[in-house]
Image (cartoon, grey):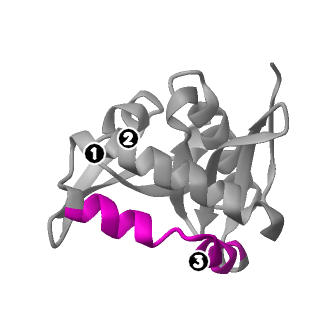
Amino acid sequence: MELKIRQAHSDDAKAISQVIVAAVRESNGQDYPASVIESVAAHFTPEQVIELLEQRLVFVALLENEIVGTGALDGNAVRSLFVAPQQQRKGIGQALMARIEKAALGRGIESLLVPSSLTAEGFYARLGYRVLREQLHGEERTLIMTKPLSLL
């Protein structure tokens, strides 16, 4: 199966929402209490995804025309990188990050920030991101990570 990555459009909102909610519930559930999981999932309804598509450069990863991952560039920050649970650990997240980093370089961005979940810290570290600081928002603990792109 060939992986394709393209810019997202509003018709993708429902599928993007489904990927994000499934990934948050199944993957992040081990590191966060249910209240945090449901709060995060509630921020990614199809309607809210459409709003994000207007604010960010959003990409989707497709296998056989099915959306299996998503990620976005928002200024100098990577946002909402998620891969469907059944497709994780197959290089999809890495391919999305490569596309986001390429887009950032094309916009003259020299380094990226990523607010990482505890769950994704190892993933980002393998891609060369390093923790700058922790951020707490209620019970939700996020790691702010960075990577200089000039080294690519």
The CA distance from mark 1 to mark 2 is 6 Å
Percent x, y of residue 148:
49, 47
Percent x, y of residue 109:
62, 61
Q: Which amino acid type is shown beneath numbered disc 3?
A: Gln
SS for callout 2: helix
Picture layout, residue 29 above or below residue 73: above
Of 57 and 19, the residue lying toward us:
19
**Image side of residue 129 versus residue 89, left or right:** left
Picture layout, residue 121 above or below residue 126: below
Callout 2 crowding tier (Cα within 10 Å): few <14, some 14–19, many ≥20: some
Picture layout, residue 57 above or below residue 131: below
Percent x, y of residue 145:
35, 51
Q: Which amino acid type is shown beneath numbered disc 2?
A: Glu
The CA distance from mark 3 to mark 1 is 22 Å
| Residue indicated by mark 3 | 48
**Image side of residue 41 versus residue 94, left or right:** left
| Predominant SS of the magenta segment | helix
